Image (cartoon, helix red, strand yellow):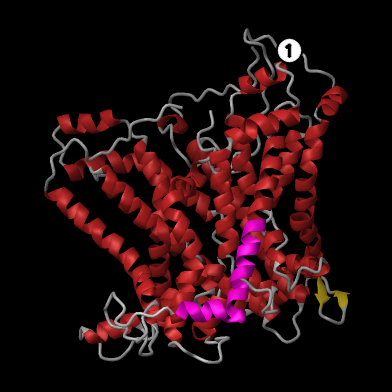
Amino acid sequence: MITTHMLVIPCGHPCARVPTQPLNGVILIAKKQKLTTSTGRPIQKKPLGKRIWNNRGFYLMFIPVLVYVLIVYYWPMLGIRYSFYDYTLKKIEFVGLKHFQKMFSEKEFWKAFTNTLVLSVTKLFITTAASVIVSVFINEMANLFAKKVLQTVIYLPHFMSWTVTAAIFTLFLSTSSTGFVNETLKNWGWIKESIDFMHETSLWRIVYYLVNIWKETGWGTVIFLATLAGINPELYEAADIDGATRLQRIWYVTVPELANTIIIVLILNLAKVLNLFESVFVMYNNRVFEVSDVISTYIYRKTFLTAIPNYGYTTAVGLFKSLVGCFLVIVCNWASKKVRGRGIL
Amino acid sequence: MARKKEFTAGRKHRTGVFDVVNYIVFIIIGLIILIPIWKVLSDSFNAVGVYKFQLFPNKFTLDGYKVIMTTQKLYRPFVNSVVTTVIGTLLGLVMSTLGGYVLAQKDMPGRTALAYFLLFTMIFSGGMIPEYLVMKKLHLVNSMWILVVKHGMNVYNLVLMRNFFEGIPGSLFEAAKIDGCTPMGIFFKIVLPLSKAALASIGLMYAVTVWNDYSTVQIYITNRDQVNFQYILRVMVMDGDTPVTQYSVSQTTLYYAAIICAILPFMLLYPFLQKYFVKGVNVGAVKE
């Protein structure tokens, strides 16, 4: 019997500790392994030409995927050259690095860049923290039925689109007489005047974070709960024998077991901090650009809401975003290898 | 795989103050999530707009839904959404199954190269504008099929499928081969029947993505005949641009009814398919 893919996880390895750890990122590239017989003697492969011929059916199967990926993903990459051109409706003309100079001197662009980082990173840390806390306490629930019902409920908002979420909260928070939140607060006598949650520069970010917590906290717990399900029950028994209280058990057993997963979740998500578009786009408006404009919305506005768009300039901004994103992925991949001995790619 | 009995940290203890507080907190969390959804549902049936803290309609009406079902500019996007979601999901499933199965072939020459070919698209992309220009060349701008094309395949889902296929024991294939089954026969007779659960999870992931997509429509489509329901919802609620001329119903009731229509398909499926929804994250997770 020939085994080609036996992979032994060493005992001290971080992966070995949590067998059901769901967060793999993507393992796309398998390590090359030598073909050996069960006794460890290397076996000779068939000649390459023969192997290609034997697999001809599979190559045929891959053609649709190949064509799709070439058209939808690779063809646009050729368009990156436009970042060195003036590209308007009338002309395409080479201009060198003009767009990049313009971009880096533009105040609006840097505003968008810092806003992206601030919104994205804050959102990531807040929702991760909320998910960790919620999953730790779900884990303490003894009644399995209640646990299942609760999980069903808190996963729910994740499957609603950003449009729906924004629509719900815009209607609830509106200042008109149809705004549920303002009317309720006034009714209870907590406030006298309606608060314009969505159009106030000082409030918009808070509303944005709260909506994110509402929508994504529950879904974030999936990963942590899977890790918690893999904790060795003996650890809790040992803690009980040592006379630990419930809170002590949480603090000294549950939380340390989660540490590794928390770091991985943060790393995986840090790689995509720049991909912030829809959630902001559906909630922002021109009165709060100052605190809400992010790179993608900036690109969108400069292209589709400008009378004579220069595709060259917005392509350049997009290229900058892609390059920084690429750099972040590589850094996070490296960090992930350090932490758990396996990359995210 | 034998199912491990679920372990809960709190199980061995008698119910104490901690548990009581814990349950109360979780009831509150559950209410925070459910009340907005419930409020939307109840107000979509509410003929008289009273928007204080009340959780039941004071005068029941179905007019909001009637308006949506009878106004062409409102039900047309809904039909578009259904059509693109169904076709997009099927295309996505076919593509990720094909690609995943090919990449799972261990002795196929060039498999690593193909994997890198796909991997690169996850690290780097052309960006919004070059993509737009390509789609313009393909005459997909202002057509709802852009939704199908853009979500026709997701590399991440393809990798999940591949990981799943690699988890199928190799001895099954060997046995089939010895019995004279062709590679295609193995795919249709053994692999696909075994992957029903994985296909359900990934199909749901595609369906949710296509159905919920708003930004693609916003970028690519201006023709109101081609937009999907998310777009029309957004235009109505945020821009106040209601495509209804005569109101037999309060505007807010109509908005709430539209929100319910936008979430209805998945809310109906969700309780029954929850395990598939969640499994999407875990497919291909354990890889030994």
Where residue A259 sits: x, y (%)?
37, 43
Lateral position of residue B27 relative to residue B124, left or right: left
Check the image and report above or below for B214 versus B182: below
Q: Amino acid at mark 1?
A: Ile
Task: Between residue A81 and residue B1, name the one nearer to us.
Answer: B1
Where residue B151 sits: x, y (%)?
66, 57
- Residue occupying the point 49% across, 42% down: B282
Quadrant of the rendering where the N terminus of chain A is positioned: top right
Residue B105 lies in what quarter of the image? top right
Task: Between residue B112 and residue A64, name the one nearer to us.
Answer: A64
Magenta stretch: includes residue A244? no
- The answer to whether residue B235 is visible is yes
Label tally = 1
Where residue B242 sits: x, y (%)?
55, 86
Magenta segment's dominant SS is helix
Residue A178 lies in what quarter of the image? bottom left
At mark 1, the secondary structure is: loop
Q: Residues within 10 Å of mark 1 (few under 14, many from 20)?
A: few
Lateral position of residue A70 relative to residue B226, left or right: right
Residue A76 lies in what quarter of the image? bottom right
- The residue where tag 1 is placed is A43
Check the image and report above or below for A165 versus A14: below
- Residue occupying the point 26% across, 79% down: B53
Task: Between residue B141 and residue A122, name the one nearer to us.
Answer: B141
Q: Which stretch appears magenta? A: B64-87
Check the image and report above or below for A135 versus B288: below
Disc 1: host chain: A
Where residue A91 sits: x, y (%)?
87, 79
